[in-house]
Image (cartoon, coloured by chain):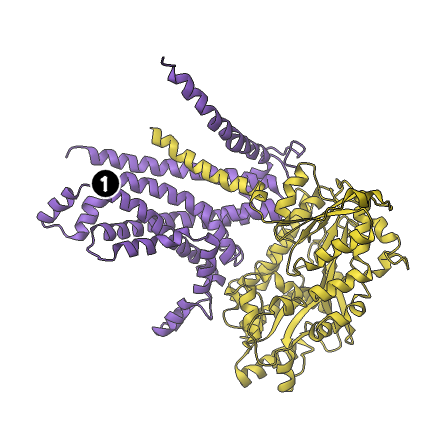
Chain colours: A purple, B yellow
Amino acid sequence: MRKNPKSFIAICTIPPILLTIVFMLIPMANAVYLSFTDSTALSVGLNSRFVFLENYKYMLRDDDFILALINTLKLMLIVPAVTVFFSLILAFILTQGKLPEKKVYRTIFFFPSILSLTVVGIVWSFVFNPTKGILNHFLELISLEQWKHSWLGESRTALWCIGVALIWQAVGYYMVMHVAAIDGISNDVYEAASIDGANSTQKFFKITIPLLRRSIGITYVLSLSGTINLSFTLSNVMTGGGPNGASSVLLQYMYTQGMRNANYGYAMSIAMFTLALAIILALISQKATEEKEADYGKAP
Amino acid sequence: MKRKVIAPLLIAAMMLGSLSACGEASGEAQATVVDNEKTEETAAEGGEWAGQELNIAIFQGGYGDEYWNRMVEEFESSHEGVTVNMTISPTIADIIRPQIVAGNAPDFICLSDSSEDGLILSLIKEEALLDITDVFEGQNYAGTGALKDDIIDGFLESTKCAPYQDGKIYLAPFNSGPQGLIYNKTYFDDNNLSVPATWDDFFKLGDDVKGADGRALFTYQGIYPGYLEEMLWPAIASHCGEDAVKAITNYEEGSFNNPKVLEVLQKMQDISTNGYLMEGTVGMNHTESQSEMMIGHSVFITNGTWMENEMADAPREDGFEFAMAPIPTFAAGDTHYVMDSCEQFSIPAAAKNPELAKEFLRFLYSDDSVKTFAEVSGSLYATKTAKDVGKSSLSEATYNMYGIYDEPNTASLVVSFATVPGSCKVNPKDEIFNPITSVMNGEMTVEQWAEDVEAAFAEVRSSQ
């Protein structure tokens, strides 16, 4: 006797659908609603005053928000690109290189991504410490005293210190994803290239990168959203958003407004803006990689 | 096409993770719940409060939990039949916020209005705190007089305790202590240095020590410039009068960019531009700068009496002894103001047992409680007799730091900002203190600083 598997499958999907509705869609709808209110995080129910677009209008003339937005965009422009680039190089070296201690390096490079982000922030705070930090000591050692800075305390450098920490902790993670993708490329291709006299650099740019477009596209999108999310913790731990907002990022400003200043409604409107920004950028980068993929697939 | 949809959804899910983390952090928060259950027999024995329960929520800060464990025990034994359920945690706001939203507020909260979580600020904005004026108008625990007369002058009237300035008290002052310039007394004694009275003396001392052993004159908690309020407000009060500080805390137009206040702001920038600020200060956090000061890289740091406890394990110069000096004044003979501040207790309006919570509050101001607090935490309650009651329990250095008010020509200064309207998105203290690093770095002039603060004040006024 065979029962209809369709109804069984339908029943099986009910729990995840319910969980999605309760834990994702309802909070999401609530966040959208709250962004139109002046909720203080204690009045998250229906008793907050409905202010409609007031929060969004204020956002456009809020200098602190605009500064946080610019800082986030700066990080999003640089951090994912550098992260993906370095992770690709490391993945290529580990898969195509002749290093005997490959496995050790793979573990070492992956190690930062299993560390708590707070720990990463504290470790890098020590690196950038103006008097005891290894960076300033190193610059002193190589007679570049004029390059010494109070890295986390100066407007010009604070944001990029966070960027460096972000790249350091994420490179290993994406490297592992790329290693898996490179393993999927047939060795015949590399061997054929070697026979044709291609060197490592040529193999990297002419074989690995084109064949990994899809993987690069995904890691780039992930890195983009990672930058938005993780910069919040690092900025909080390393600089507190300072000096004078020079290293504040969108989610940190959202947290400050929502929790510290008790403007939960406004915080939710910042969250909605960030969400929209992330989705738009993800769509754009998806579109970009797909078009290139199509180009690559075309016969010459 | 499928991937096109999946990727943005993935992003949306990750973003939601961070959103929901804000609202529901309670799940992750670590808490210690002490449930001192009494048997029903005890409850049946009688007593005014017999059989009643009190739920208290305590922020566990640098003072630890011993004081609170002892208070719960003593309150239960002195109030027969009462059960106190205590939740104590460094992240107490994350734990009780969902409870308050769900209509299950604790009866008593120990959490400051200036804490990062903003919970008390939300309760103030929502007008969700209980009016506790009657507790202070009523008798103290010993029954020797009105409780309000026991509290150090200036607190109950300030917005720290009366946030709406309507003559009613909604928050009770907890601890209190002077905040000023911390220095190493042994270093001063060994080198025959005297505490600078005026800004000129201050900078001259800076030149002397720089010439003698190369140490800097001053440092502060770098990436947390809010600590500099301990310098800014007393300096403004001395030079421009207490009313000038009041005008600023009420966001009055022209209160921050007037010439007298600008002179004070300029003195603060002079510390850096004239080379008196410890190298690297702006990039350090509070622990780093405090450690640097204690190992002798700077003469002074702004801080409060808690620093001795906070830095108990930090390395230090030989013979280091904590001492506190007031902020310098412009002219000899001007009053030295010393900033005082307090954390607070409060009772939510939705408390299930407000009367027992009020009784617990009165109990906390009893001599036994004040003495225990001094003994366990090395700090004092905001009561007039706390210093005498706790004398035997405090270290000599801390006791001497509390004695700063007894110096001639010295006055206490309680600074509390008027509550900003619910719809206001500006945090005035952030607007005042965040630019200080840029001012110290020379990236901003004091005039720009003052103008930015005035713009923020205008924003607050327009929200009213």
Q: Residue at x 64, y 57 (%)?
A: B61
In this picture, is A180 found above or below A135?
A: above
State which chain disc 1 sits on.
A
Which image quarter is the C terminus of chain A in?
A: top left
Instruction: Decide if residue A234 is on the left or right side of residue B238.
Output: left
Report which residue position mark 1 lands on: A184
Is residue B153 visible to us here? no
Which image quarter is the N terminus of chain A in?
A: top left
Q: Quadrant of residue A41?
A: top right
For the residue labelled by badge 1, is the local secondary structure a helix, a strand or a loop? Answer: loop
Q: Residue at x 75, y 54 (%)?
A: B73
In front here: A222 or B141? B141
Instruction: Decide if residue B280 is on the left or right side of residue A179.
Output: right
| Residue A131 place in picture, x, y as percent | 47, 71
Q: Quadrant of residue A182?
A: top left
| Residue B382 place in picture, x, y as percent | 77, 61
In front here: B125 or B387? B387
In this picture, is A21 found above or below A130?
A: above
Instruction: Decide if residue B192 is on the left or right side of residue B366.
Output: left
